[in-house]
Amino acid sequence: MLRWITAGESHGRELLAVLEGLPAGIPIALDEVQADLARRKLGHGRGGRMKFEQDELTLSSGVRHGFTIGSPLGIRIQNTEWPKWTEVMSPAPVDAEVFTTGRGTPLTRPRPGHADLVGMQKYGFTEARPALERASARETAARVALGAVAKKFLAELGIRTVSHTVSMGEVSLPVDAAWPVPEDVDRLDADPVRCIDPETSARMVARIDEIRKSGDTLGGVTEVLVYGLPPGLGSYVHWDRRLDSRLAGALMGIQAIKSVEVGDGLEATKRPGTVAHDPLYKVDGAIHRSSERAGGIEGGMTTGGILRVRTGMKPIATVPKALHTVDVATGKNATAHHQRSDVTAVPASGVVAEAMVALILADAVVEKFGGDSLREVQRNLRSYLDNIPESLRTDSALVNAETVTGDIDDTPMGDSLSEWRV
Ligand SMILES: Cc1cc2nc3c(=O)[nH]c(=O)nc-3n(C[C@H](O)[C@H](O)[C@H](O)COP(=O)(O)O)c2cc1C
Ligand SMILES: C=C(O[C@@H]1CC(C(=O)O)=C[C@@H](OP(=O)(O)O)[C@H]1O)C(=O)O
């Protein structure tokens, strides 16, 4: 089992992350983890902090001479602005009253759409600072660092991820646009909104500029695709072992994510069954599918095809044209407090989603193939694939159903199935 945990406030000293359960022998280079952190800061529409935040990374434990050693992997990411925040965020005791009121200007006008108000109610604060500090998506830097390590592990097994932006507000990628492949990662990262189609990207950028000028914010949808997965990660036997359940939980755990779709998702709910699934065909000695509508998961398990999941992000809640709220210090109607903020973080949310998907898949790999060293995992994976009987072997290459020839056996199956037919 793989376990991970993060700690750290947005304007605290640093973020901490621990990943436990990885096999030994995975090559980890600091600059590769750092590169993933840099990808998360990209994207047209991000705010001032992303320009100067350095994401100063330290690998504190679990890696020796460039390889994991099987012990918990510890990561620290220092916050560049800490010197400016040492007093407001100081862990040193001041006096009893400061526990609830804090130092610095008290934030008593909670922002709708944030953890501000309920955080105060739940934890007993009289201002929003102690709640918003941890609710902030600054924490996603720690998850992306862990995800970078998980991706290195998966890459050693031939499993590769890519993510891209599907829609920005009402501007969407055409439905027939080709899916990105891992070779597109650099091109996507170089695009201002991480969109595969230049024409749609330009429209998304223009929409962000328009929204910024009007003092508003935008949400959107990103998609993660994973190539090279074996069939059988996850399981149908129990709800919490289903891979789609685990992915959805992890993705919904990203700040501001409000929907998760697997494969054709909601689109598929509008279609009849004949055009909603992925029929099977035997061609040249292997079973092929003719479509990838299910998103590479059937019965809570990977099919061996391309895994495809989408996450929908709500618009940033710190709206410059401030939303209506109540000042809880005076009891009067007011406008929410506003500080520097992103206009949109949809492109960054795709990079975070990629990290969460990689962590869940790495966990599922450890569960299925076990192993204390990378070599052992690789051996177990090979042996599993080699032992799938000839008659059940699948090939992830799609076939064109119209070109499949030969007789179709449509006689009813044995007694047990025909009994259902009543
Ligand atoms: C990468 C990323 C960056 C974000 N940046 C901001 C931001 O600059 N300002 C803001 O108000 N919310 C930002 N958010 C969203 C808030 O953290 C989120 O809306 C808040 O935690 C409440 O959302 P929830 O109800 O889903 O928890 C960001 C989210 C992500 C994933
Ligand atoms: C710091 C990051 O994102 C932050 C997420 C965030 C929020 O409210 O979620 C608010 C902003 O922070 P600040 O209030 O300090 O400007 C973003 O910059 C980051 O992604 O590394």
Image (cartoon, rainbow, N blue to C red):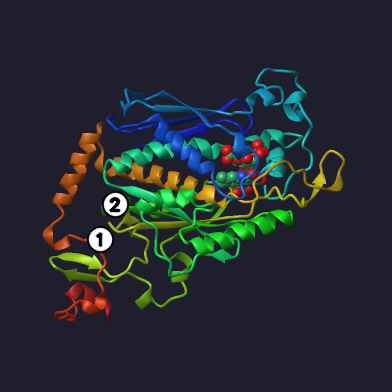
Place of residue 258 in the rendered image (x, y in percent of width and height, measured from the top left): 56, 55
Q: Please tell me in which quadrant of the rendered image residue 132 appears.
A: top right
Residue at point 58%, 63% (across, down):
203
Q: Depth check: 16 or 207 in front?
A: 207
**Mark 1 highlights which residue?**
396
What amino acid type is highlighted by mark number 1? Ser
Q: Position of residue 313 (x, y in %)?
A: 57, 54
Q: Is residue 239 visible?
A: no
Front residue (pair 38, 15): 38
Q: What's the mark number on residue 229? A: 2
Is 52 drawn above or below residue 196 in the view shown? above
**Picture quarter with the C terminus:** bottom left
Mark 1 lies on a secondary structure that is loop
Asked if labels 1 and 2 touch by Cβ distance under 8 angstroms, the answer is no
- Local secondary structure at mark 2: loop
Who's the residue at 17% across and 81% down the image? 411
